[in-house]
Amino acid sequence: MNTFIGVDLGWYGKPSGLASISLEGSELRLRSIDRLEKVDEILGWIQSEAGSGSAVAAIDAPLVIRNRIGIRPPERELNRDFRRFHAGCHVCNLGRPFAQNVITFSRRLEALGFGHGASITPRQEGRFQIEVHPHAATVNLFGLDRIVKYKRGTREQRSPGTSPSPWSGPFPFWRRSILL
């Protein structure tokens, strides 16, 4: 079984959001959702969800940071393509306060057997960690004109004209969207 794990690392003392799905036949099935704060708990959760099989841990944070100042070249490219959708990413360098924390997190994932997945191929067996940019992915996958704002204000202020909750109902849109 292949397991896909999503991690949205909490910044500055906020909990991290965690989700795992598995590929069963031709469908993706939700396995687990959680919010945890301590790095050891997060890594334990990832290890438990991955089990002994193949797994991809998609981390919404920079995993490889080599530049002392400025912006990484991939961030510059992503911002060039997605800023107009409000889906650009933040500058990342070794001088940022979070840099050492995410580098350490990535190294600890490596110690659990999750290699960097820069060159993985579709359906490749193994355990990998990849850096993801969910806003850019959401804009691209769903053909949006801009990201869905979800962090501040009321739902109507964040995303005027959207339905009350795309995650509810007898057949939520995400289930239709992820069937292979």
Image (cartoon, rainbow, N blue to C red):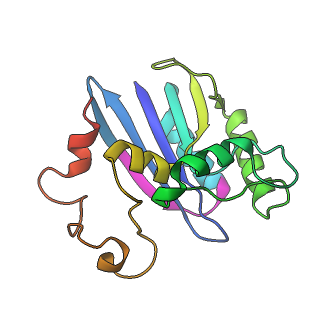
Q: Where is residue 3 in the image (x, y as percent from the top left)?
A: 44, 32
Q: Which residue is drawn at 65% across and 59% down?
A: 90
Q: Quadrant of the N terminus?
A: top left
Q: Quadrant of the C terminus?
A: top left
Q: In this view, does 81 lie above or below 69?
A: above
Q: Where is residue 6 in the image (x, y as percent from the top left)?
A: 49, 46
Q: Can residue 19 be seen in this view?
A: yes
Quarter of the image where one finds residue 153:
bottom left
Q: Residue at x 66, y 56 (%)?
A: 39
Q: Position of residue 130 (x, y in %)?
A: 59, 37
Say which of 106 and 120 sits in front. 120
Q: Where is residue 110 in the image (x, y as percent from the top left)?
A: 71, 34
Q: In this view, does 88 lie above or below 108?
A: below
Q: In this view, does 69 lie to the left or right of 73?
A: right
Asked whether 115 falls inside the magenta stretch, the response is no
Q: In this view, does 43 lie to the left or right of 35?
A: right
Furthest toward the left, the residue is: 170
Quarter of the image where one finds residue 166:
bottom left
Q: In this view, does 20 lie above or below 124?
A: below
Q: Which residue is drawn at 81% across and 55% down?
A: 70
Q: In this view, does 95 lie to the left or right of 149?
A: right
Q: Which residue is drawn at 42% across and 27% down?
A: 2
Say which of 160 and 93 sits in front. 160
**Magenta segment main secondary structure:** strand
Q: Give the range drawn in magenta.
A: 31-39
How many marks are shown on the rendered structure? 0
